Image (cartoon, rainbow, N blue to C red):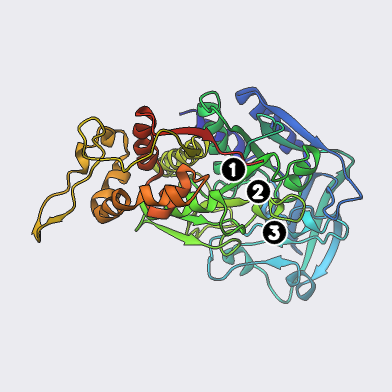
Amino acid sequence: MRHSNIIKDLLHLNRHHVSPDMDKAVNKLCEIYGGKVDEHLDDDKLTWRIPPGYKVIKAELKDSKGKLICSHEENPMHLWSYSPSFSGTVSYSDLKKRILVDFDRPEAILFHFRNQYRFHKPIWGFSLNVKKYKMLNPEEKYNVNIETEFYDAPLKQFLFNEPTNKNNLILVAHLDHYAQLNDGLGSAILNNEIVSEIKEDLENINLCSLNSVEIVGSVYFLKKYKLNSSNTISAISTNGLTLNSNLIFQLSGKENSTINKLIKLFYLIHQPNSTLQKFREGWGNDEIAFEVPSIKIPCVSIHRGPHPTYHTNLDNLSQFSNSSFEESKTIIKNIIKCLDKNYTIEIKNWDSLICLANPDINLYVEPLSVSNIKQKSDVENLSFYNNLSVLEKKYLMQNNQKIINFCYKFQSFLSHNLNTTIIDLAYEFSLPVLFVKEYIEKLREKGFVSLTFKNYN
């Protein structure tokens, strides 16, 4: 499996925001997928600033007898990211102020990331698990030897398929959490695989994958390519999608957006093994860069949780679920395909009530009760039923009355709601988008409607 090999190759690189190993990671992705190295220089007109290049030469913490407590070589997460150089002897009380430990997760070494965003005033420090923390003696003094290097360099991220001047859809996940699988890396690779597999098949959407430097990289990316709601339909932020955990769908802040309608429908179909959250109520990162004044790109998030190894060295290959990877990839691909075929329904030769039961039409679904006599659903008799996924079929069988409601009401709805799209209609009746699309396609074949891709711009 290509994706698992890529993840293994990149996992242990020290992918600090701007660093030699980030360069290696981005170049490796270019070799595999094509795409490009997306470079950015610091822009003093933006409030988000690009950190300097950063390299760790050596970092050790020892007691007064020379016994090693921890080192960057042993595990890079021991050293706080973007720690400045420091060499000297410190007391236990002073050292304790510069130690990060989590007693609720005793085996974990925590990822300290704040310096990456506060690089104008970085502080040195170490992260320890509980066992190493208990090695510290309040009566001791400790020798700290941290040697790091800051240098001038552009910020680099990986971009697979460049944005165009219309109908962009951006998949975004961050690449900069070194030694961690599910906080960024696994989902970045998943996004790349999706673009690789379906970008040539899309008829209306330009699909891009940005493996970003979290938040700051998205800010600069959006400015560089002049992206906003006039040329970009939406964005999907992904994270934690290789966890063996339930799906979490997080909405855009744009309440009635097309992408929100679609996410709500997918949430319905994937219950009970999914939850729905409002914007920024769950695991948040790059989506916040898209939903600001003048950009206004609705950005949803799809992730998994709970994530007990979050921001720790325990977020390693033992946390990789290939089944979650494949399921997540399928779901996001289906969301993209729904957006790509979100046609506006235009009335053509439709000047009287359509008899759905007419053998030439054959779109009628029998009610579950006739003259108070219960009967079995015949939805399976629809010619396109077998095109649906197993989950979509299961949802329809459990919600058969929604299909009946649709058959009774959709002609009235279309007569009173001009410019209705496939997704609008599916959302109105809480039905799978593919079911509604196939249903309307049958009406198109009979000449009752024409279908035109929704103009988002």
Q: Secondary structure at mark 2?
A: loop
Q: Position of residue 337 (x, y in %)?
A: 48, 35
Screen quadrant of the C terminus: top right
Q: What number is the disc on residue 281?
A: none
* Category of crowding for the residue at label 2, using alpha-carbon neighbours closer than 10 angstroms: few (below 14), some (14–19), many (at least 20): many
Identify the residue at horizontal 17%, vertical 48% (top origin): 377
Q: Position of residue 264 (x, y in %)?
A: 46, 55
Q: Eyeballing the image, is 87 above or below 361?
A: below
Identify the residue at horizontal 86%, vertical 38% (top origin): 153
Q: Secondary structure at mark 1?
A: helix
Instruction: Name the mark nearer the viewer: 2 or 3.
Output: 2
Q: Which residue is mark 3?
A: 112
Q: Eyeballing the image, is 108 above or below 439?
A: below
Q: Are the residues tagged 1 and 2 within 8 Å (C-beta)? A: yes
* Category of crowding for the residue at label 3, using alpha-carbon neighbours closer than 10 angstroms: few (below 14), some (14–19), many (at least 20): many
Looking at the rendered structure, the kind of residue marked 1 is Leu
First in residue order: circle 2 vs circle 3: 3
228 on left or right of 328: right
Looking at the rendered structure, the kind of residue marked 2 is His
Q: CA distance from mark 2 to mark 3?
A: 10 Å
First in residue order: circle 1 vs circle 3: 3
Q: Which residue is mark 2?
A: 177
First in residue order: circle 1 vs circle 2: 2
Q: Which residue is mark 1?
A: 185
